[in-house]
Image (spheres, helix red, strand yellow):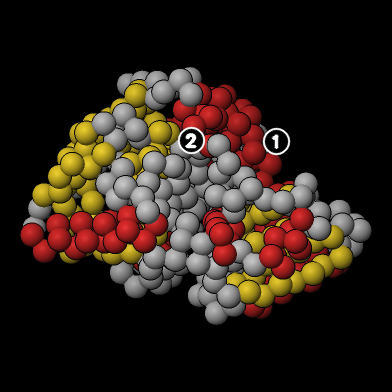
Amino acid sequence: MSSTIASPLPQHDGRSIAIDNLLLRCAKIAPGQAVLFVNEIDSPNVDRRTVEAIEARARDLGATVTTIWAQLVPGPDDIPAQIVNAIAASDVTIISHNLGGLLRLRPIPGNGIAVHNYASRDEILDSAWTRVPYALWEVVGGVIADDFKQRRAWHITDERGTDIGGTVPANNLARAYANVFSTRTFPIGTHQPFLATTANGTLSIQWLVSSANHDIGDGIRLDHPVLADVRDGRVVEITGRAGDVSIAKAFLENAGRLTGQDPYRLSSWHAGINPQAFTAWSDVSHLARWQTLAHNNPRTLHFHIVGEHTPGEISLPLIDPVVTLDGETLWDRGRFTLLERDDVRDAIKAYDDRGEAFHLNPEIGI
């Protein structure tokens, strides 16, 4: 599938800008540093030529580069000792591998910077998404985090039947983020999760996709959405076409059995915040690859289900939701309205005086 970038940033030497954005602005590499690249063998998400171009630039910048190519890792407890030790010995680790997601669940050894790199194929590296200055999103991310810390109630609807809400516990940040998401991501695309332990209402289900905590398959796409009745953060009933209901329940219960988790427990949710985010794949042809990138776009939101801890074993995406926090609409069918505030616009003028970083790319693969 092809993707059209809406109102792109300047195209001049785009790849070099993107690579330096990753290495210098995000990973902050410096001459003489030990930089480790961990790349996944036989992954459709990783193109050898793309990551080798990034590695070559790191050498040009004076880094001492080491590369490990490794097979997919089934779960956080299966990360090879060789890789753990190599990360601990490195100043910077650039991860183009599924273990970038696994390290959300396992503390990273050493004191270096680790970056989970989404730009491991030309389709992503050559996009406007990767050229938006990383510092811009550090600033915006701080504004978003400060705002969301003050929020105490959320409500989410969508056109497939979702109508669900909850309150934010006072210890939301500590519980939602303890020992998870300790890697940086490039490019930035989402925010710290809100807990869903108090959720009540109706949740539409059309996609159930692995959160990449463990190797439990890509996921499922239902022919017709089904509706989950949620009470106090747990799905108590699923209704809809019988065949689709059976498929959804079987998938969730199998994930629960494989991981020893409650298959119907919601732990948290978060939505895309980066309007330039897109995916080069569709939900029909490559479900897991689609979700990995599409979840960064404001057109998408996903709940974490199966297990009490963030992130759950399964992602449950919603498309074009309307989300209110304390009665204020923050996501409106693809518009992340917080980015339209004057204080946000003012904060990023030094990085993007024309505001092009916030132009929505609507192409999310569905």
Residue nearest the viewer, comparing 169 with 226: 169
Q: Position of residue 244 (x, y in %)?
A: 15, 61
Give, as a three-letter code, the residue at label 1: Ala
State left or right for residue 10 relative to residue 336.
right
State left or right for residue 154 relative to residue 11.
left
Alpha carbons under labels 2 and 1: distance apart: 32 Å
Image quadrant in which you'd find residue 60: bottom right
Q: Helix or strand or loop: what does disc 1 sit on? A: loop
Please give the name of the residue rendered at 64% of the width and 34% of the height, measured from the top-left corner.
139
Tell me if residue 317 comes above or below residue 66 in the rendering: above
- Which residue position is annotated with label 2? 176
State left or right for residue 315 relative to residue 24.
left
Give the foreground label among 2 and 1: 2
Q: Helix or strand or loop: what does disc 2 sit on? A: helix
**Is residue 172 something one can see in this rendering?**
yes
Give, as a three-letter code, the residue at label 2: Ala
Residue nearest the viewer, comparing 241 with 296: 241
